[in-house]
Amino acid sequence: MRVGILIAAAALSLGLAGCGIAGHETRDPAILDVPVGFEPIPVPAHNPLTPAKVELGERLFFDLDLSEDRSLSCASCHFENAAFADPRRLSPGVHGRLGIRNSPSLVNVAYLNLLFWDGGALTLEAQALGPLEADFEMNMNLGDLITRVESDPSYVSQFEEALGEGPSIRTLTQALASFQRTIRSGGSRYDRYVSGAVDALTDSERRGLELFRGKANCASCHNGFLFTNQAFENNGIEPAGSDSGRARITLDPADFLEFRVPSLRNVEKTAPYMHDGRFDSLEDVIDHYDQGGTGVRNQSALITPLRLTDQEKRDLIAFLNSLTDETILTGLTP
């Protein structure tokens, strides 16, 4: 199963013999080791992690039967080799319908306070309902979904084993959320550098780190072990269609065009960039910030011209690439 690959990869990259899910009984609480420097993974009391629940969630995550026409799974918009992001600008749904946003990475998603680009979901359990029901994503009637799952005896048995009861919207979303909480990544060359391996970064990458923290001011929003402050910011990009960002949820004009500050871990692997995938490369992203945004209404005061030299831009990109944890992407076996 893929979750075993992910856990083994994290263990290899971090030198942790016990990285993974512990516990022998099916419904015993599970313990997740975390990368060095990370906070413990938050797990809600109503949905404790167990090996059986994670395995069920993984199966559901990759199951095409969760979509109306059986053409899409969760994994159809969250590619393992793209750090569980979508390499396409806009993520297509059933019948070729296009959404309005790019699907973000799910790596370390367990740590996020609010889900979706606009913060419209409070928990991973609630988040799962959005893609399942949206007509431009999986377009699945929830009643029909449970009927479909119940028609598979192996699913019914697996639900009973993992959750002590049969398939329901509650148990299905708990299983999906449990699997997603295990998708985590540390172990980048940057992590080795801050742990004392001074040769883990090149001269260019170290210069980029200084720029990141200083002149480029990236760390004002991209900070902490996740490289995000989890806030919502208007970063000065022109609106795309009618998407008003956080204001769609809060109905507050002060939140116009504000979107969640994404984590920069594995950013090298998660192109295209921004909530609508408008930038194809990190060079495009840095040019945007270097120019100080577009001056769109409600643009954050943090977005100002940087006047970076060409060499500084190269150094900054070099540092960003050092945040990649290759082991979570390569499909290593235990």
Image (cartoon, helix red, strand yellow):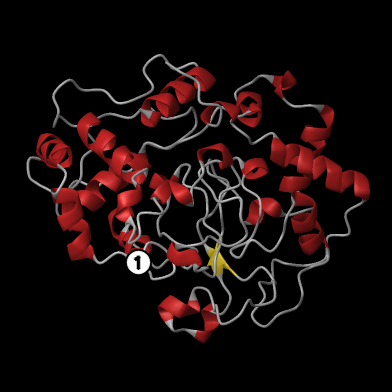
Name the residue nearer the viewer: 201 or 301. Answer: 201
Q: Please, is residue 135 above or below residue 197 in the view?
A: below
Q: x, y (%) of residue 267? A: 63, 44
Q: Residue at position x 35%, y 49% from top?
A: 64
Q: x, y (%) of residue 103? A: 52, 57
Q: Residue furthest left?
A: 165
Q: x, y (%) of residue 254? A: 54, 82
Q: Please, is residue 237 above or below residue 157 in the view?
A: below
Q: Amino acid at mark 1?
A: Asn
Q: Residue at position x 69%, y 33% from top?
A: 322
Q: Please, is residue 170 above or below residue 108 in the view?
A: below
Name the residue nearer the viewer: 156 or 96. Answer: 96
| Residue 41 seen | no
| Image side of residue 316 versus residue 165, left or right | right
Name the residue nearer the viewer: 198 or 112. Answer: 112
| Image side of residue 258 versus residue 138, left or right | right
Which quarter of the rendering shows the C terminus?
top left
| Residue 302 seen | yes
Q: Please, is residue 208 above or below residue 200 in the view?
A: below
Q: Residues within 10 Å of mark 1 (few under 14, many from 20)?
A: some
Q: Residue at position x 19%, y 46% from top?
A: 45
Label 1 belongs to which residue? 139
Q: x, y (%) of residue 272? A: 66, 54
Dot 1 lies on which element? loop
Q: Residue at position x 27%, y 36% from top?
A: 54
Which quarter of the rendering shows the N terminus?
top left
| Image side of residue 47 versus residue 6, left or right | left
Number of numbered discs overlaid on the protein picture: 1
